[in-house]
Amino acid sequence: MVSIARATVLLSVTVFNGSIFYNDKNRVFRGRRTPMEFYKIILWLNEELQLRATAFKISQEALVDDISFGERFDTGEEVPAIDKDLVF
């Protein structure tokens, strides 16, 4: 009788992503600065438990060319500043 031991490895992936803000590239849409580029960093352990990573810098400029960014959007409500603490 042959016994084969199998190891179960829990695979995990960690992803970091966010906006890249530029003073000259960002556009204003509905009264808010809209970033044209984003980053994504992906980390994982391979089957030999070695750390691996890949990263992307992605632009959405070509996708949003048809949007009129000069327009304003007004709901009539006061919008809180995002640099202050908000209490709900």
Image (cartoon, rainbow, N blue to C red):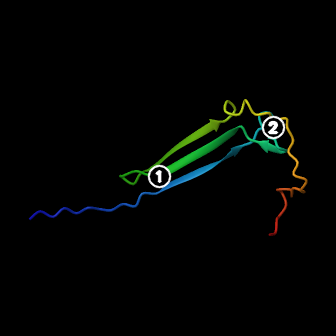
Compared with residue 2, is residue 38 higher up or lower down, i.e. above or below?
above
Report the residue that reaches farthest toward the left: 1
Q: What residue type is disc 2 on?
A: Asn
Rendered residue at 82%/56% (across/down)? 82
Q: What residue type is disc 1 on?
A: Trp
* Image quarter (top left, top right, bottom left or bottom right) of the C terminus: bottom right
Coordinates of residue 39 in the picture (x, y in percent): 63, 43
Q: Nearer the viewer, residue 71 or 45?
A: 71
Rendered residue at 80%/33% (across/down)? 68
Q: Classify residue 27 as left or right of residue 39.
A: right
Say the numbered circle drawn on residue 44. Answer: 1
Compared with residue 6, is residue 71 higher up or lower down, i.e. above or below?
above
Say the numbered circle drawn on residue 67. Answer: none
Q: Secondary structure at mark 1?
A: strand
Q: Earlier in the sequence, mark 2 or mark 1?
A: 2
Picture quadrant where residue 38 is located? top right
Coordinates of residue 63 in the picture (x, y in percent): 67, 33
* Image quarter (top left, top right, bottom left or bottom right) of the N terminus: bottom left
Compared with residue 45, is residue 56 higher up or lower down, i.e. above or below?
above
Picture quadrant where residue 6 is located? bottom left
Residue of label 2: 23
Coordinates of residue 22 in the picture (x, y in percent): 77, 38
Q: Crowdedness of circle 2 by 10 Å Cα count: few (<14), some, many (20+)? A: few
Q: Secondary structure at mark 2?
A: loop
Q: CA distance from mark 2 to mark 1?
A: 33 Å
